[in-house]
Image (tube, rainbow, N blue to C red):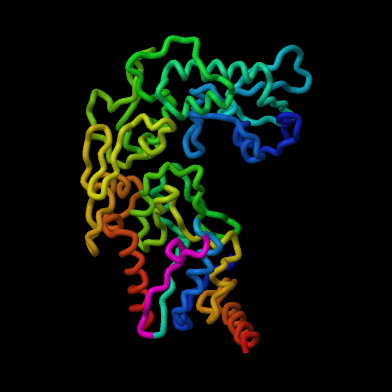
Amino acid sequence: MKKRLIVTPDLCIGCRTCEISCAFAHAREPGRPGQSRVRVYPRGEQAGMPVLCLQCEEAACMAVCPVGALVRNEATGAVEYLPQRCIHCKACVAACPFGNIAYEEATDHMIKCDLCGGDPTCARFCPSSALTFADSDAEANLARRRKRVTAA
Amino acid sequence: MFMIINGNEVKAAPGQTIMEAARAAGIVIPGLCHHPGLEPYGGCRLCMVEITKPGWKGEGSLVTSCNYEAEDGLVVDTRSKKTLASRREVLALLLARVPDSEVIRDLAAKFGVKETPYKKREDADLCIMCTICTRSCEAVGAFAITTQGRGGDKEVAPPLADTSACVGCLACARNCPTGAIPFEDGPLAMTVWDRTFEKMRCTVCGKPTIPRAMAEHFAKKAGLPVEYFQVCDACHKRQTAEAFAKVLY
C-alpha cells in the first residue's frame, strides 16, 4: 500500500511548525508561512487543526482542469501541479471543496501540496507527530512512539 | 530511445516530440505557438530544426520540432545554418507583422534580426496568429473565439461577433505571448472581448471570486456540483477544519 500523510488532530499542539517547514521547502520566498500549503486552524486554546490537500481519489481539481495540468503521481499518490501546462484559468481553485489549492498572484501559478515528492517536510518536522507519513495507522503509531522516545 | 541533438545523446520517450525531449535535456528551442498544455500546432515556424537520419543521403530537412515525434537515432541540429536562416526569416516576417511588439523585437534581437526588409503592416495590432488563445478556449470547452477571415485579413474574434459563448475565464488573454488581447481582471469584475463579467461573491465571506458563467460552465463540464464554486478557497479551507473538528470532537 502507498504511504499516506496521516493527520491526527488530537496530537496537534498548534505550533505551526508544519506551516513554516512547508514554507521553507516550497515557498517562493522561503520561510513565509503565508505561502505555505498547510494551514493550522485554532481548535480550542492550545490545540490546532492542520488542513492540507487530501489528495482526493476523485479530485475535483483534476476533473475540472481543462489541460491536464493536475496529474496523479502514481508513485506517491499525490495530485501534482505542472505549472508549465497550466493556462491560468483558476478553475481548480474555485472547484476544490476543501480550499486546498490556492492562487499565487506574484507568480500567476497555483500552489498545492505535492507530498514533497514522497517525503513530506511537514511530517518530518511535526514535533508532536500530528502529521506522519506512514503505510498505515499502526506504523504511524510506531513512528510516533519512536519520536517520543528520541525526544525524551 | 535516443536521439542526437547538437552532437549530444538525448533520451526521449515514445510519443514525445523533439521539442519536449530537447527542453527536458536543457536545450533551448524557441517557440511562440507552443504551449505544453495544449495540442501542438506548428504555426509560428520558429521552432524549426534540421533533421537527418543515419543512412540519409543529401541534405537534412527542416521540420517543426513542436509537433515532430522523436525517433530513435534521429540526428537533430537546432543551430545549423539552415535552421538559423529559416528562424531569422520568420522573425523578419513577424517584425513586419507586429512592429510594436516588444516580445517579438527582443526575440528577433536575440537572433540578430534588428530590421525587417518587408513592409510593415499598417494599423498593426499585436496578434501573431499563434492561436494559443483559440486553443485555450477549445480546451476550456467554451469555443467562444476562433480565427476568421483569410490571408492578411485573418484575425481572432468571437464568431459572428457573438460573445455569448464566452465564460470570462481569461485563459485566452492570460496566455497570449504578445499580450494582444486586451483584458481587465478587476477586483469586482473581469472584462474581455468587450464583455464584462461581474464576479460572484463567496456565500460565506462575500469576497469576489469568479464570474458566474465560468463557475456554471466548469461545474457542468467536470460534473461537479455548482455549490463547490460558490465559496472562496479561504472559506472552504476554514470550513474543512471546522467540519473535521466537528466530526472528531
Magenta span includes B241: no
At 50% from the left edge and 74% from the top edge, which residue is drawn? Answer: A17
Q: Is residue B13 visible?
A: no
Q: Residue B21 falls in which quadrant of the image?
A: top right
Can you tell which quarter of the image residue B158 is in? Answer: top left
Residue located 71% across and 36% down the image? B10
Residue at the spot 26% in from the left edge and 43% down from the top edge = B190
Q: Nearer the viewer, residue B167 or A152?
A: A152
Give the extent of the magenta segment.
A30-45
Left of B74 or right of it: where is B229? left
| Residue A35 lies within the magenta run | yes
Closest to the observer, B205 or B85:
B85
Q: Please tell me whether residue A22 is drawn above or below residue B126 in the rendered image.
A: below
In terms of depth relative to the viewer, which is nearer, B106 or B59? Answer: B106
Residue B24 appears in which quarter of the rendering? top right
**Quarter of the image containing the N terminus of chain B?**
top right
Q: Where is residue A48 in the image (x, y as percent from the top left)?
A: 41, 78
Could you say where residue B12 lies in the image, as x and y percent from the top left? Answer: 67, 37
